[in-house]
Amino acid sequence: LGELGGARSTDFDANLDRLLEIGCNCCGVEVGVASRVRGKRYEVIAIRAPESFPVKKGSVFPLEETCCAGVLGAGRPLALSGSRELPAPNAFRFQAYLGTEVPLGDGVYGTLCFASVSPRKAVFTATDKDLLRMMAQWLGTELERRERGRTPAWRQARADSEGRASAPARRPPRSVDLNDVLGRVRRQLA
C-alpha cells in the first residue's frame, strides 16, 4: 500500500488493479471488487477474480442483490461469512465478504470489497478491516485527484447524472494509527 501511495505512475487503472491484487493477497481471498454506486445501481469499475468468475468490469447489478448494500451508510467495514449472514439473493455467490464504502468529497462514490466464493476457515481480523479502510481512503483520494482538473460545472453535471445527491452522507473517516496496524501485521506474520 505504501508503494501505491508513493507511486509515480499516473495510470489509475493499473494502480487500482495493483490495489485489488494487494487486498486479495493480504486477505487470503480470490476476488477483489471496486464499484460505483448510483442510487440503487451497482457497477463494477474494477475486478480481480479467476477467469471463470462470471462478473467482469462494467457488470451492473441492482444494489440490493450485492453484499455491498449493507456497507453504504455503515461508516465501518462489514465482514460477513456463511449463508446465514450473506444477503439473498447474493448475485456474486460469495461465501465470505469484507467491504467498505469509498469516500469521495463529502459523499460516497461506491464500495471496495474482498471476498471468496468458497467458505473461509479464518475470520477477517481487525488488521484486515484497517487495511481495507486505508485502501478505500487511497481509492477515494485517487478518484478525487482525477476529478480535480475538471470544471465545477462538469463535476455538478456528473454528480447529478450519477444520483450522488441522493447517496447517503459520508461519516468522517476514522483515523487509523498506521504503526499499530503494521505492528499487528508484523505479529501475524511472525
Image (cartoon, grey):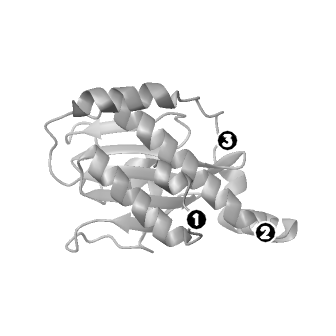
| Residue marked by disc 2 | 149
Give residue 64's position: percent from left, percent from top: 43, 53
Q: Amino acid at mark 1?
A: Arg
Give residue 21's position: percent from left, percent from top: 34, 59
For the residues carrying marks 2 and 3, which lies nearer the camera in this image? 2
Q: Amino acid at mark 3?
A: Ala
Q: Are marks 3 and 1 in contact (CB under 8 Å)?
A: no
Q: Amino acid at mark 2?
A: Gly
Above or below 64: residue 126 = above
Answer with mark 1 or mark 2, whichever residue precedes in sequence: 1
Separation of residues labelled 2 and 3 (CA atoms): 24 Å
At 19% from the left edge and 40% from the top edge, which residue is drawn?
A: 82
Answer with mark 2 or mark 3, whichever residue precedes in sequence: 2
Image mark for residue 169: 3
Above or below 74: residue 151 = below
In front of the other: 41 or 144: 144
Assess disc 1: are there few (<14), some (14-19) or many (≥20) residues with their C-alpha within 10 Å of its C-alpha: few
Image mark for residue 133: none
At 40% from the left edge and 35% from the top edge, which residue is drawn?
A: 129
In front of the other: 53 or 185: 185
| Residue marked by disc 1 | 8
Element type where label 2 sits in the image: loop
Separation of residues labelled 3 and 1 (CA atoms): 32 Å
Give residue 160's position: percent from left, percent from top: 75, 64
Looking at the image, residue 30 sits to the left or right of residue 113; the answer is left
Answer with mark 3 or mark 1, whichever residue precedes in sequence: 1
In front of the other: 9 or 53: 9
Separation of residues labelled 1 and 2 (CA atoms): 18 Å
Looking at the image, residue 53 sits to the left or right of residue 4; the answer is left
Picture mark count: 3
